[in-house]
Image (cartoon, rainbow, N blue to C red):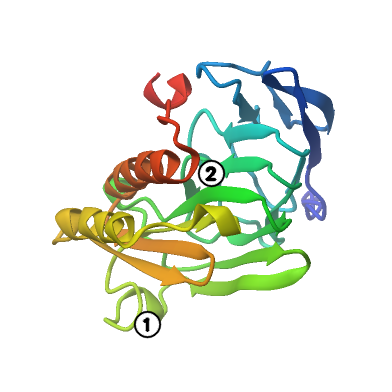
Amino acid sequence: MNAIATPVNTGWSATLDLEFALRGARTALIRNRHQGPLRVQRPFYPEHSGQCHVYLLHPPGGIVAGDSLSIRAQVNPGAHCLLTTPSAGRVYKSNAQRLQQTQSVELSVAEDGVCEWLPQENIVFNSAQARNCTRIHLQSASTFIGWEITCLGRPASGDSFDQGELVQQFDLYREGVPVLLERNRFQGGSELLFQPWGLNGATATGTLVCAMNPEQQLQKTEIQLLQDQCMVHKGVVLQAAATELPGIIVIRATSAQAAPIRNLFIEIWRTLRQALLKQSAVAPRIWFT
């Protein structure tokens, strides 16, 4: 008698709940609660102004059918945190039941708080069923700089994104009022991936968002510098553009791979740090190990 395989209906759920508060001249991690395979290393302080760097760890190294990750962080008044990941995230092929693989990120920043959300890229494998939702809640004097970089398939390994789906959602609110609401739906093998009105054959895409408080408006020369940085990198390998909206700057880029986008975003991040916070950016050491 042949054995019948039992369908996989559920996966791993993992949650991470963080809170940052100003303690003297430093930002401290005062709450660190986790459930499942999602946690952080100890805080790092590579900068001179007390900014708290935290690395988000997901020991399995990727999410499979039915998995869900939930990340929440609260940045209290005057605190300044930088959140990143030690390596690229991976969303593997789903199963026969096409169970979704989800990640949700919710960041809340109080008055005079600063949050930098700078994860390394997510690699979405062929036949994945990925859902990625990021929500940012700011107050009137909050500052946010963040990016998300996505690779569709693994072209270098001959694994194109022919099947599956990625649904992305990015919501930015200030005092409860929506400032930027974005939805993307990438279906494997669809025209959106190849046509000039879509990704035009690019397999990596990224968006950088900077939300400034009213006292941090960029000067025209600084906005021009951001646009020049995009133009310098623009070419066959990378396409990038900067858009100025009320209270925010949005940088969009596409490429054949993640590295050119990441390098551009790091350069722009350094520019924004100096322009808005009058602080030189110190890149997390984990990016170079």
Q: Name the spot of residue 36 as percent of width and height, x first.
A: 81, 32
| Res 90 label | 2
Tell me the amino acid under the disc marked 2: Arg
| Disc ID at residue 273 | none
Judging from the image, what secondary structure is the residue with disc 1 in?
A: helix
Q: Quadrant of residue 181?
A: bottom right
Taking the image as shown, residue 7 lies to the left or right of residue 62, namely right
- How many residues crowd around disc 1 within 10 Å: few (fewer than 14), some, or many (20 or more)? some
* Vertical comparison of 52 with 179: above or below: above
Tell me whether the residue at label 2 lies in contact with that at label 1, contact meaning CB atoms closer than 8 angstroms: no
Name the residue furthest front.
Answer: 215
Which residue is pictured at 36% across the width and 54% down the height?
Answer: 159
Q: CA distance from mark 2 to mark 1?
A: 24 Å
Viewer-nearest residue: 40 or 153: 40
Left or right of 45 in this view: 5: right
Q: Is residue 112 left or right of residue 264?
A: right
Residue at 83% across, 31% down: 34
Q: Is residue 251 left or right of residue 24?
A: left
**Which of 49/54 is in front?**
49
Q: How many marks are shown on the rendered structure?
A: 2
Residue placed most toward the observer, 160 or 104: 104
Residue 3 visible in the snapshot: yes
Q: Is residue 282 above or below residue 74?
A: above
Residue ID at (33%, 72%): 199
Task: Give percent across and percent down for residue 52.
Answer: 63, 24
Question: Which dot marks residue 191?
Answer: 1
| Residue nearer the viewer, 21 or 151 | 21
Image coordinates of residue 219 in percent, x first then y, are 36, 58
Residue 190, given in percent of the width and then of the height, sits at: 42, 79
Label 2: which secondary element: strand
